[in-house]
Amino acid sequence: MHYQDVTVRGAGVFGLSIAFCCARKGARVRVIDPFGVGAGSSGGIVGALAPHTPESWNDKKAFQFDSLMAAEPFWSEVAHLSGLNPGYARLGRLQTIADARALALAEARSISAEQLWQGRAQWTVVPDSAFAGWAPPSPSGFLIHDTLSARLHPRRACEALATAVLALGGTIDTGSDDAGPDRGAVIWATGYRGLLDISADLGKSVGNGVKGQAILLAGDAGPVPQIFADGLHVVPHDDGAIAVGSTSEREFSDPSRTDDQLDGVLDRARAICPALRAAPVLARWAGVRPRARSRAPMLGSHPTRPGAFLANGGFKIGFGIAPAVGMIMADLVLDGQDRIPDAFRVEASL
């Protein structure tokens, strides 16, 4: 057990996962976020945990695969300790196949998945009739069905993580940035604002924010796979709602405002997925995701705060890799054990 003090700056999914993993190892953990738990992009509504394609294997894809495989026990433990349901379920994903060339590529990937995914998940080609009534008709008549993809409810997942940290004896300070001095090792996980601060300190860009807009529709689809088609994620949740997203906006003036770009997302979703055509709108959401210059997460020593650590840049895969990020950062901070892939090191984005 590690009876060390750890301060985590940021209560998004990276910060909370690191706090949880440190507390689980016995550290005295304090999380500080003036904006609240899941206040940034981690408080979104989509929650698609989807893998990269099983080909051209590299450290990033291997890390994501390991994290997706670790997700079920991770979120199960979070749910047990918190008494809250993060909405996790590994139900797979369907993707449309455009033409004969794409069909041949999908079939080749099904072969590589057998090796790269170690027989623990499958990437198969199935007729679109296998999911008639839910999946969109595919131009080729076939769909990709992978069994590695999962979903969770981002807001509920963050609340469950925060409650689990409290259950392990940690504290969470929100509402003010003036929470007193940091204690022990300090990890900065402050999202896109943190990337902008580092860029300003260094006088060069190490990353920025990419705004995304998503929409929540009423509809209990049951335990069916999520859909990825026409660049959109369609994710059915366990609370009678279906999330659709998202846009990717480099230029924006208001990070939390939705606009007519989201209307376009809704129109596209209803066009590709018959089950959504009459579904009422429950909520609209917008937020800004942290994107590092390298497009990979930035993990390790903080570049402008000597002695501190950094965990940022989850961008579109933050929830999918959060279990592994939490574990390797806890090992680094508490044990000095460095297992960070080279592609994820802070230096890769400097």
Image (cartoon, grey):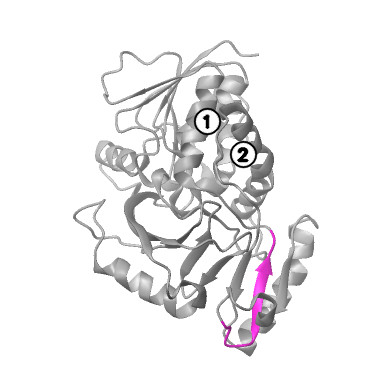
Q: Is residue 274 visible?
A: yes
Q: Is residue 142 magenta?
A: yes
Residue shown at 59%/43% (left/top)? 341
Q: Is residue 74 above or below residue 270?
A: above
- Judging by the rendered image, the residue that carries numbered circle 1 is 18
Residue shown at 56%/49% (left/top)? 320
Q: Quadrant of residue 37?
A: top left
Marks 2 and 1 in Cβ contact (< 8 Å): no
Mark 1 residue element: helix
Q: Quadrant of the C terminus?
A: top left
Residue shown at 62%/88% (left/top)? 140
Q: CA distance from mark 2 to mark 1?
A: 13 Å
**Left or right of 236: which side holds 62?**
right
Q: Is residue 82 above or below residue 347?
A: above
Residue shown at 70%/71% (left/top)? 109
Question: What's the magenta region?
Answer: 137-147
Nearer the camera: disc 2 or disc 1: 2
For the residue pair 219 and 333, the one nearer the viewer reads as 219
x then y, percent, for residue 348:
47, 46
Q: Quadrant of residue 257?
A: bottom left
Q: Is residue 192 magenta?
A: no
Q: Is residue 19 visible?
A: no
Q: Is residue 41 above or below residue 277?
A: above
User: How many tags in the picture?
Assistant: 2
Mark 1 is surrounded, within 10 Å at the Cα level, by few (under 14), some (14 to 19) or many (20 or more) other residues, namely many
Q: Which mark is residue 75?
A: 2
